[in-house]
Amino acid sequence: MQNWITEFMGQFGYLGIFLLIAIENIFPPIPSEIILTFGGFMTTYTKMTFSGVVLYSTAGSVGGAIVLYKIGHLYDGNKMEKIIDRYGHILKVKNDDINKASSWFRRYGNQAVFFCRMVPLIRSLISIPAGMSKMKFTPFLLFTVAGSLIWNILLVGAGALLGENWHKIVEFMDIYSNITYFLLGAAGIIIIALWAYRRRRIKLRKEQE
């Protein structure tokens, strides 16, 4: 897949980046890490610019995210599970992936759209629970643009910086993903613990009164 992606980008330039990133958001198994870092590398030997790659990749990210948001907006959880059961093998997406994204959205609220835009796989799927929860479109769009922009700048910049060694970023992303999952999980546990502690103190205070 990596060779096909790089050849497609080499042939179609900015348009290729836009299309691949948009598709990557709808079909998560296509790795954005390859698209973005190779796009950064292309700025070192073609007429493509850093700002151009970031602009087109961000437009593709937002476009794909809107599609998934609209799908989530149209279907509830039960209908979505049936769709994934039927077509998930084609999209390479499982109900567990959707459930994980939904869990993070419930835990962190609208801000999950921003933070999860910087987590592989979840970055695409978070748009579905956002739509299912009927999150207002304007904040969804703002959080999506902001999160996607940061993610794209970092990876395109890394690709440009490493040049011919751009592929090393792809190897590093597996470690980054695991660390991110751990930190988000730990943050969730801390938040729940603080919430439970606060409720307990309020209850004790009422009993003393």
Image (spheres, rainbow, N blue to C red):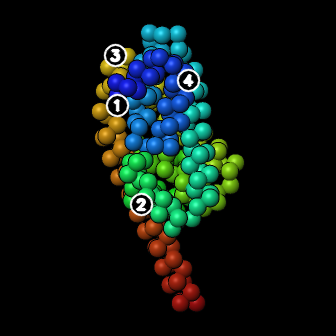
N-terminal label among 3 and 4:
4
Q: What's the residue at 39%, 59% (across, down)? A: 96
Q: CA distance from mark 1 to mark 2?
A: 25 Å
Q: Is residue 13 visible?
A: yes
Q: Measured along the vertical axis of the image, is residue 50 above or below residue 181?
A: above
Specify which label sits upstream in the sequence, 4 or 2: 4
SS at badge 1: loop
* Residue identified by numbered label 3: 164
**Residue 188 percent location from the top left of the image:** 44, 60
Q: Which residue is mark 1?
A: 1
Distance of label 4 from label 2 (alpha carbons): 33 Å
Q: Horizontal and vertical percent for residue 70?
A: 62, 51
Q: Residues within 10 Å of mark 4 (few under 14, many from 20)?
A: some
Check disc 2 and report the residue beneath it. Answer: 85
Question: Which amino acid is tagged 1?
Answer: Met
Q: CA distance from mark 2 to mark 3?
A: 41 Å
Q: CA distance from mark 1 to mark 4?
A: 18 Å
Q: Nearer the viewer, residue 3 or 44?
A: 3
Q: Amino acid at mark 3?
A: Glu
